[in-house]
């Protein structure tokens, strides 16, 4: 189907992200364009249709064609940008200028009701672009924008399926359609560390999944609403879910002389029960509820109790160690995350090469007390996963 002259002018001067189109969508009607009518335009519209439509638009004073003496050919058209609104009415399609106005109004209303700085900044960034007449990804999806707003409004933790039901009246829609897009916004918060899993990021904002569990082996006694549970008889390990984390508090460490956090499950499972050791499987960055639970350990442990962390000898492992030391255990020291252990694992064939992009991230990382390990990793260009090291 051939294109109309009105459609051609709209596509050329109103639909793109060029300066003229952006200025017009932002509210500027100034200026006159002078498109030449060459063979490519004639092919798109058709010679006879072009002539007839040009006469009609000229009659409505929307364009001024540069006719030949017989009105059978057009060299160029003088096209005032102020004619675009009327052209949209002629072709009966949505006017992007009006669409952007509605988007600005809707997002401004959400912004005015939002207190969380991360979301205020996101809305501000979108509004700045819209006010310049630019098309912005997600700005036309009101459910997506409302979803972010509802996350910022959460006062307490909620399950992901409950959140989806409350916002969309569909318990699975958030996970199916919006979760990945929402996460791209949530990750921009400076409090979110690179390397965090999606479920860990959602937990930071109050959305819980069934992945938020905590596992340990050792003589930890905790209480749930006044009821005391002694986990020491569970010599092969204990696991509590997110709901238990919310309602439980550690109260005693019977004879525990050493606390060891372990990043990967295989290594954790491989540790045998020892009455003097508390082994904690943290599988990455602990959720806010897990952090609250674990912070109680420092209050009930002897003041001389040492804290160790054993994890991957890679970028993520270094970041997790630093995070645990900052957020949980100030006396934390690395275990089996040293140059000697790294070289032994490398010689045993457990090295995993990394690309140049990751090398740049290593170089930028302040590894603190793991700087020697970082230098060794950079020298050999290999990561070592914790599973390549045995206790």
Image: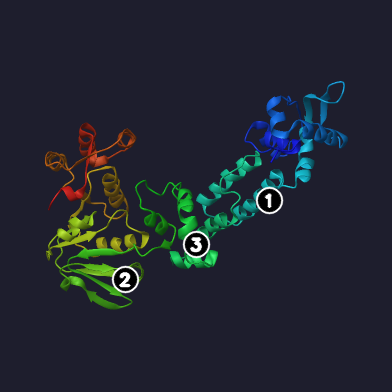
Closest to the camera, between mark 2 and mark 3, is 3
Q: How far across and how far down the image is residue 115, in percent?
A: 55, 55
Which numbered dot is residue 173? Answer: 3
Q: How far across and how far down the image is residue 191, in percent?
A: 41, 49
> Which residue, given by chain and number where applicable, does mark 2 sit on?
248
Look at the numbered disc 3 and give the secondary structure of its residue. helix
Look at the numbered disc 1 and give the secondary structure of its residue. helix
Q: CA distance from mark 1 to mark 3?
A: 25 Å
Residue 335 seen from this side: no
> Which residue, given by chain and number where applicable, does mark 1 sit on?
102
Closest to the camera, between mark 2 and mark 1, is 1
Q: Residue furthest bottom?
A: 227
Q: How many marks?
A: 3
Q: Nearer the viewer, residue 165 or 213?
A: 165
Q: CA distance from mark 2 to mark 3?
A: 32 Å
- Along the horizontal axis of the image, is 291 left or right of 30? left
* Above or below: residue 178 compared with residue 193: below
Residue plotted at (71% across, 35% down):
8
Q: How far across and how far down the image is residue 286, in percent?
A: 32, 57
Q: Quadrant of residue 295?
A: bottom left
């Amino acid at each position: 189907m051939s294109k109309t002259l009105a459609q051609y002018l709209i596509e050329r001067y109103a639909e793109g992200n060029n300066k003229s189109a952006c200025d017009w969508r932002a509210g500027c009607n100034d200026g006159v364009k002078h498109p030449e009518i060459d063979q490519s335009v004639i092919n798109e519209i058709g010679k006879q249709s072009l002539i007839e439509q040009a006469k009609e638009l000229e009659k409505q004073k929307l364009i001024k064609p540069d006719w030949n003496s017989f009105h059978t050919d057009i060299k160029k058209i003088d096209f005032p940008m102020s004619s675009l609104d009327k052209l949209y009415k002629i072709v009966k399609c949505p006017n992007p200028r009006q669409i952007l106005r509605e988007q600005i109004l809707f997002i401004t209303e959400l912004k005015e009701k939002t207190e969380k700085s991360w979301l205020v900044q996101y809305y501000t960034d979108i509004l700045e672009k819209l006010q310049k007449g630019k098309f912005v990804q997600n700005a036309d999806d009101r459910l997506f924008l409302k979803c972010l707003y509802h996350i910022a409004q959460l006062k307490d933790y909620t399950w992901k399926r409950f959140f989806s039901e409350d916002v969309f009246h569909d318990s699975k829609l958030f996970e199916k359609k919006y979760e990945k897009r929402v996460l791209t916004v949530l990750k921009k918060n400076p409090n979110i560390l690179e390397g965090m899993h999606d479920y860990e990021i959602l937990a930071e904002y109050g959305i819980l999944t069934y992945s938020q569990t905590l596992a340990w082996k050792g003589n930890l006694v905790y209480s749930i609403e006044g009821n005391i549970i002694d986990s020491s008889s569970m010599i092969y390990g204990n696991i509590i879910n997110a709901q238990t984390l919310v309602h439980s508090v550690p109260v005693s460490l019977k004879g525990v002389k050493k606390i060891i956090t372990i990043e990967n499950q295989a290594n954790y499972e491989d540790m045998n029960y020892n009455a003097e050791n508390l082994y904690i499987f943290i599988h990455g960055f602990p959720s806010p509820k897990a952090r609250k639970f674990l912070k109680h350990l420092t209050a009930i442990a002897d003041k001389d109790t040492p804290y160790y962390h054993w994890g991957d000898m890679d970028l993520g492992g270094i970041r997790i160690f630093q995070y645990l030391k900052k957020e949980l255990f100030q006396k934390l020291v690395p275990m089996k995350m040293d140059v000697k252990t790294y070289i032994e694992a490398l010689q045993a064939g457990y090295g995993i090469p990394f690309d140049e992009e990751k090398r740049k991230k290593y170089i930028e990382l302040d590894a603190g007390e793991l700087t020697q390990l970082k230098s060794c990793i950079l020298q050999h260009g290999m990561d070592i996963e914790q599973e390549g090291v045995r206790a």
